[in-house]
Image: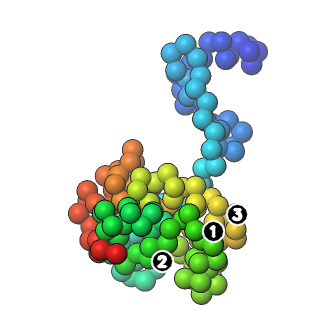
Amino acid sequence: MSQTESLEQPDRRLLLLSGGGVVALAAAGGFAVFARDRFAGAEMTPPEALDALRAGDILLIDIRRPDEWAETGIAEGAQPLDMRRDDFIEALADLTDGARDRNVALICARGVRSDRMSARLAEAGFTRIIDIPEGMLGSRVGPGWLDRGLPVVQP
């Protein structure tokens, strides 16, 4: 079967193509293709992150916007650092005392921004980035920090 024939008659499987984060999803009548930089590193659930934070094993960074922090609070023990800052990488390096090999966990609202920022930080030389894909509000992978009833503080 040629490549053209396989695209004309898709099976209904999720396919990973090229290892670069391109995903083709077989749907009735054709394919939907989504491409993005997907972080392929470590992940934690919110309870795992809280335990690691309390044990001193990670630095937890809330990368959301100040209005989001005000609306929901910040995960207890997290450092708020708005990912839109022009100096975000430098500010994070300051928080890690320049140690780009420190365990740094990122949390956002629903895991989308933390995933993207994790990939960006890995490219910038941070070697131990951990994504919390549930985020504060929950996502397809889980209920999130708030719905799990984990502690928050007001900014």
Q: Is residue 14 above or below residue 137?
A: above
In this image, 155 relative to 38: left or right? left
Point out residue 10 in the picture as x, y percentages from the top left corner. Answer: 60, 17
Q: Secondary structure at mark 1?
A: loop
- Assign the C terminus to one quadrant of the image: bottom left
Q: Which mark is residue 86?
A: 1
Task: Name the residue beneath numbered marker 2.
Answer: 59
Determine the residue positioned at 63% across, 73% down: 87
Amino acid on which disc 1 is placed = Asp
In this image, 92 relative to 55: left or right? right
In front: label 3 or label 1: 1
Point out residue 66 in the picture as x, y percentages from the top left corner. Answer: 42, 67
Characterize the local packing of mark 2: few (<14), some (14-19) or many (20 or more) Cα atoms within 10 angstroms.
many
Determine the residue positioned at 63% across, 39% down: 35
Characterize the local packing of mark 1: few (<14), some (14-19) or many (20 or more) Cα atoms within 10 angstroms.
few
Task: Name the residue beneath numbered marker 3.
Answer: 123
Q: Is residue 137 visible?
A: yes
Q: Which mark is residue 131?
A: none
Disc 3 and disc 1: Cα gap in Å? 16 Å
Q: Secondary structure at mark 2?
A: strand
Task: Please tell me which residue lies in front, 88 or 35.
Answer: 88
Task: Please tell me which residue lies in front, 28 or 121.
Answer: 121
| Quarter of the image where one finds residue 69 | bottom left
- Assign the N terminus to one quadrant of the image: top right
Point out residue 137 in the picture as x, y percentages from the top left corner. Answer: 34, 54
Nearest to N terminus: mark 1 or mark 2: 2
Determine the residue positioned at 59% across, 87% down: 97
